[in-house]
Amino acid sequence: MTPPPVLSVRNLVVEIPSRAGISRPVNNISYDIAPGEILGVVGESGAGKSMAGNAIIGLLDRPAHIASGEVWLNGSRIDNLPLEDLRRIRGRQIGMVFQDPLTSLNPLLRIGDQLTETIREHLPVTAAQARERAVAALEEVGIPAAAERLDSYPHEFSGGMRQRVVIALALCAEPSFVIADEPTTALDVSVQAQIIALLRRLCRDRGTAVMLVTHDMGVIAEAADRVAVMYAGRLAELGPVRSVINAPRHPYADGLMGAMPSLSIGQRRLRQIPGAMPRPSKIPPGCAFHPRCPRAADPCRVDPPPTILDDPQGRAACWFPLEHSA
Amino acid sequence: MTAFVEVSHLGRSFDVSKPWLNRVIERLPRRNLVAVSDVSFQIEEGAVYALVGESGSGKSTIGRMLAGLMTPSAGTVKVAGADLHADPAARKAAGIQMIFQDPYASLNPRWKVRRIICEPVVVAGGATAGLAERLLEQVGLAAEDADKFPHEFSGGQRQRICIARALAANPRFIICDEPTSALDVSVQAQVLNLMSDLRDELGLTYMFISHDLTVVRHMADRIGVLYLGRLMEEAMPEQLFARPRHPYTQMLLAAAPLMEGRTREIDLPKGEVPDPISPPPGCAFHPRCPFAIDLCRKERPELRDVDGVRVACHRAEDIVPASAA
């Protein structure tokens, strides 16, 4: 029996009304994340991956809003909660790690104060206990001499160390769900490897569900258990990371894998997908990918593709999915 | 065959001292940031030479010096036999162009594409009739795009405009500073393929600067690995990826994410790049190096030939890469 999912997203639609009409940067996406699982959400810029993440944690900026669909966290619905209730859930039950560690820390506060503030806001502890927890949180993310570094300011840390502080901050109230939006994009490869390993370890040890949003397929391949490939606000394919990389069903996922220069295979030319992602206001009818798709035929231009569910763990939305012999 | 581009003992430092009054009052010494230190390499005509390194390794500084946009503090750059910084005429004659990382910042938003592309030719006093249209078609855009403004294009299309502008002056040598880092994967593939095609058609020589090992491996004929402004290793891609000699290269390759995936139980890289204002003495990599000995802490290793690969490591002969062990 599989444990109930920590996070459950059902038919989520985000709309932005404007003078030119309503655009849907996130269109009907659904997925679950189990305890201890890392779900990678990958897509190119404009695919709606960050917008989906912000919608889930209730951080959409007006006029963007959730038009329909449901978000369930630990068995309770959170998408329709009043702002004040949602704020209490964020931080306590949801941890957040963003791309740029310098902008997610307050430059005027010592990191110890930022950690204890968060801990005391969400947990019933004394100041001394909060300080102890802060030291423990910093030690857990691998910051040496944690007790002394509590009194340092963010600018006294290097980029990698700052991102560790942000992760400590996200995890200090022991949330059950963490959303990490491009957590390693601003970092060098050697530091990126350290941060990925750290996320994996924390997720495994604590049973935290993680939604890892990134454009970097390499990071997904290393870190994620399952991957969701987004295109123009829709879920093109979802499945275990190995099978999506090695045997993608959706032509877009397939094109994305082929376009990646790989460290191991020396090919003369890269496979390229013609054209570019449509803007959210100009998404073509039918399957959003059809103008760039090598397999497109008549039904693709008219009707949205059906979701095929032939693998219990994976699905793809395509009229003519690629077949892979086992 | 002689080298087309010859870089010898190139160095560049920046004065990052506080203003003089602060120095006097607070008794602070002058501070120098050594961005590039004693770098020598050669690029053959028609080759793609790639520089890889993490942030702060000096790769962009070298690129700017090779383009003549910055004067070196030490050493020389010779392109087609002429010293770029001693002889101002050599810069024009050498036909050097540059493509920058950010296609949003490197195009004037108030200029139409035609004027942007023709600018290098106008400056040189050449004829521009039909030039923009021809170049736009060459880089895979439409001739009508010449009358549009940059904001009407996507990132990948803008980078094509930058390439067209670089091609306008009939260059022989193009310096590409992270040309695809701001682009999405599917668009990156289009731009990389275009660059390969143009090289074959026009016999261009590229210097390719990137932090992305997969892109570098795909494009380069020869790769130089930089760390804290020093060249640590230089080899052909096959050699470098099959058997990295320098411990830093080994660390870099081990840290790069693999599409094949792995349950990473290998040693993670230790620490981060040190402060370039006070780099470690001896070999710059020794504080992070698992093989460091006393000599590494005292003496900076020379770049020397080891089995056809150039390595700057005292222990290049005795260390075995993790992959071969």
Image (cartoon, coloured by chain):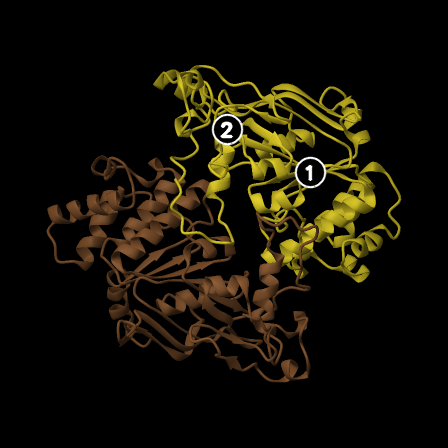
B310 lies left or right of B56? right
Residue A71 horizontal/vertical position (percent): 35, 74
Res. B154 mark: none
Disc number for residue B221: 1
Name the one closer to the observer, A125 or A259: A259
Whether residue B106 is visible, yes or no, is yes
Q: Is residue B178 visible?
A: no
Image position of A184 (left or right of B14): left
Task: Please name the color used to draw chain B.
Answer: yellow
Instruction: Name the side, left or right, on which B69 lies relative to A247.
Output: right
Asked if marks 1 and 2 touch (Cβ < 8 Å), the reply is: no
Q: Which residue is mark 2?
A: B228
The chain letter for the residue carrying disc 1 is: B
How far across and down, in percent of the image, does residue A2 sit? 30, 72
Question: How far apart in space, not on screen, are marks 1 and 2 (Cα)?
Answer: 23 Å
- For the point 48% across and 49% down, which residue is it? B257
- 1 or 2: mark nearer the eye: 1
Q: In the image, which lettered chain appears brown?
A: A
A255, above or below B108, in the image:
below
Give the image quarter of residue B229: top right
| The N terminus of chain B lies in quadrant | top right
Residue under the image location 61 percent in, 66 percent down: A277
| Residue at the image position 64 percent from the left and 32 percent from the top | B64
Q: Where does the image place residue A14, in percent across and percent down from the top left?
A: 45, 74
